[in-house]
Image: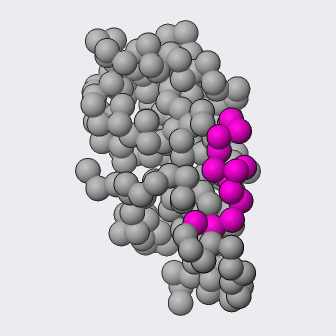
Amino acid sequence: MARDTSPACKQCRREGLKLYLKGERCLTDRCAIDRRSYGPGEHGRRRMKQTEYLVQLREKQKARRYYGLLEKQFRNYYEKANRQTGITGENLLRLLETRLDNVVYRLGFAVSRRQSRQLIRHGHFTVNGRRVNIPSYRVRPDDVVAASPSSTARAIISEATDLTATVSPWLQADHDNLTGTILKYPEREEIDVPVQEQLIVELYSK
C-alpha cells in the first residue's frame, strides 16, 4: 500500500495549521503547531513571497496531506471529479470524504486517518457484512460500516469513540455496537475541511 511516511508533525507545520494527523496528541499541549508555529527546516522562519501559484500549491498540499494521499492518487481523484457533472471542487471533496478510511475516522472508530487506514488494512472492518481491507473503497448511501465481530481491535476502536464529540451529519454512528450508516452523500457545507477547493481546481486547470 502506497502511503506518505514523512513525519506527521512536520506536515502540519509546513501547512501552518493542525491537520489532526496524530489523533489525540493534536489535542494536547504537545502538538507541534502549538510549540513551534513556524515551518520546519533550516529556513522555516523565513518569510516567503506569496505568489498566486504558491497559494494554490499550498492549498493542494494541505488537502492531500489532510486525507493522507500521495500526489498521483490525489491527481486521479481530481480527474475523476472533473469528469463528473456539477462543481469540480465539491465533487473532489465528496470523493475524498466517501473513502472508507475517512468514513471510519469520521464515525469516530479511529483517532486519526492513519490509524483508520491501518485498521482497515488489517481486516477489522466490514461494509454491509463483508470484510473490506481497501482504505480507498468508496462507500455509498445506506452502506453499513461496522467493526468485525471477530476483530481483536474492538477495544482500540471502542477507546477511539470516547474521544469523538460529534459525527458528521451525513453519517449515523452507533458507538455501543461499533456500527455506522452512510445516510447520504455529503453536501459542501457538511464537509468540515480547512481547504479552499477552488484554488486546487485553478492549480490543476493551468
Residue 47 screen position, x and y as percent: 72, 81
In this figure, what is the number of numbered marks? 0
Regarding residue 141, the answer to whether it shows in the image is no
x and y, in percent, of residue 159 in the image: 53, 17
Query: In this orientation, does residue 39 appear?
Result: yes
**Which residues, given as a range, are shown in magenta?**
28-40
Front residue of 95 and 105 = 105
Residue occupying image coordinates x 41% and y 15%: 154
Task: Reply above or below: 90 against 125.
Answer: below
Q: Image height check: is 48 above or below 140?
A: below
Q: Position of residue 160 (x, y in %)?
A: 54, 23
Most common secondary structure along the magenta stretch: loop
Given residues 30 and 177, the one toward you in this image is: 30
Residue at 50 percent across and 62 percent down: it is: 64
Is residue 36 shown left or right of residue 63? right
Residue sticking out furthest to the front: 42
